[in-house]
Amino acid sequence: MNAEEKRWLILLVTILANTCMGAGYAFSVFKKNLVEVLHCTAPEVTLAYSLSFAFLPVGMLLGGIISRRYSPQIAIAIGGSLFSLGVLLAGFAASVYHLYLTYGLMVSIGNGIVYAVAIAVAVRWFPDKKGLASGAVVAALGLGTLIIANIGQVLVTNIGAQGALKGLGASFLVIFLLAARFIVEPPKGYAPANPTGTIATAKKQSVGDVAWKQMLLQPAFWVLFAMYICAASPGLMMISQAKDVAVDITKLNDVAAASMVGLLGGVASAIGRLGWAAISDKAGRLNTLTAILLISGVVMYFVGGLATNVKGLWVAYLLVGLCYGGTLGTFPSVCADRFGTRNIEINYALLFVAFSVAALLGPWTAAQMKVVSGNYSSGFMFSAALGGVGVALSFVLRFQRK
């Protein structure tokens, strides 16, 4: 197999690995049954979902260290095993605290390791097509959500949530260990046969690189950090409540509601990651982020009314999913533009802490508001307000730049 064929094979394998991690976004399929089995409240179970994203930056940093010190193969094997065992052992959870340790901590760190290493290896194999490589790997999470949400619902219906988690976890473990064998670094000095724009890109990227300590001292970093929280929270909140909203407000059955989870966290999110990233290349990163925040804020304000019928729910979930995916697809480029690419692994891992804050803030707050108020309106308004705050922060960033 020549190098050109090998790099496409490696890209496909990294996509497969990231597809498995879509299980993290399909949590709402398991939530209702877990509440019944573990005899706890919905906010308590939802916290496990929040924790499954809270430690992603830790996993990303560990993935970089393991990959550099040993190899990407070992990093993927460790991260994939940790993720898979977290899902599998969640099926044996006897209390909500066991769920926090397994589906929360283990899944989160394993996810971060695989996520960071898969993207880094794919980009190094495609120096001439970095956007294609990173976009395809990241979009695989959305595809995985669509697939796993539907498979998970069938399993939950037949064998319960814990049985479904055991089966999925065991399957993921086999896939990750097989995938790890193929995910290797390119040869030293590797360049594709007909690179396009590689030299120019390298020169551009060598300008303006900022070390992480310097980055943390820049006000622009903290404005971006707050914007990331505002942009990611609505999507994370809606994904965590997606099935419940479809059942309680739109009155869909469990199977139809699970397909809506796939639309929101899967198809729309995947398209958004690729689509908004392409738009940002032409319209500008800050303009794109402002549009994402504005659209998500407006949709969250009206989602309660939209969700009263199936067509409205489709529109709401589609727009929220597109904006959520756009957030994840655009912020890595924003980080690279502002602070350079030489230290992007560490710099983006630190900026990604904002996503972890959003993962804790959005879903848990919405679930808590639902318990207090008895409806979803308070959570929707909270998310809409975050969108407005994010738009305001985008203008602060424009002022700082000037």
Image (tube, grey):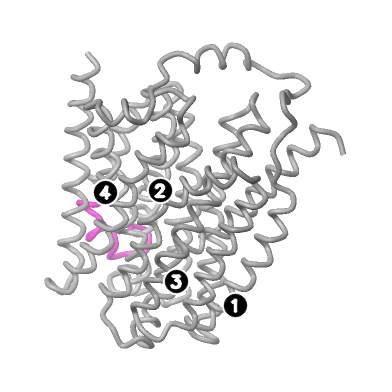
* Element at label 1: helix
Circles 3 and 2 in contact, beta carbons < 8 Å = no
Disc 1 residue type (three-letter): Gly
Q: Around disc 1, counting alpha carbons within 10 Å, would you say few (fewer than 14), some (14 to 19), or many (20 or more)?
A: some
Foreground label between 3 and 1: 3
Q: Read off the residue under disc 3.
A: 102
Residue identifier under label 4: 299
Residues at discs 2 and 4 in contact (Cβ within 8 Å): no
Tell me the quadrant of the picture where the N terminus can be found: top right
Mark closest to the chain's N terminus, 2 or 4 = 2
Q: Is residue 206 left or right of residue 218?
A: right
Residue tagged 1: 167
Quadrant where the image shows the C terminus: top left
Q: Is residue 100 above or below residue 343?
A: below
Q: CA distance from mark 1 to mark 2?
A: 27 Å
> Looking at the image, do the residues carrying marks 1 and 2 touch, with CB atoms under 8 Å apart?
no
In the structure shown, which secondary structural element does the residue marked by tag 2 occupy?
A: helix
Residue pictured at 32% horizontal, 56% vertical: 359
Of 290 and 128, nearer the camera is 128
Tell me where the magenta segment starts and ends, as one range.
Answer: 299-312
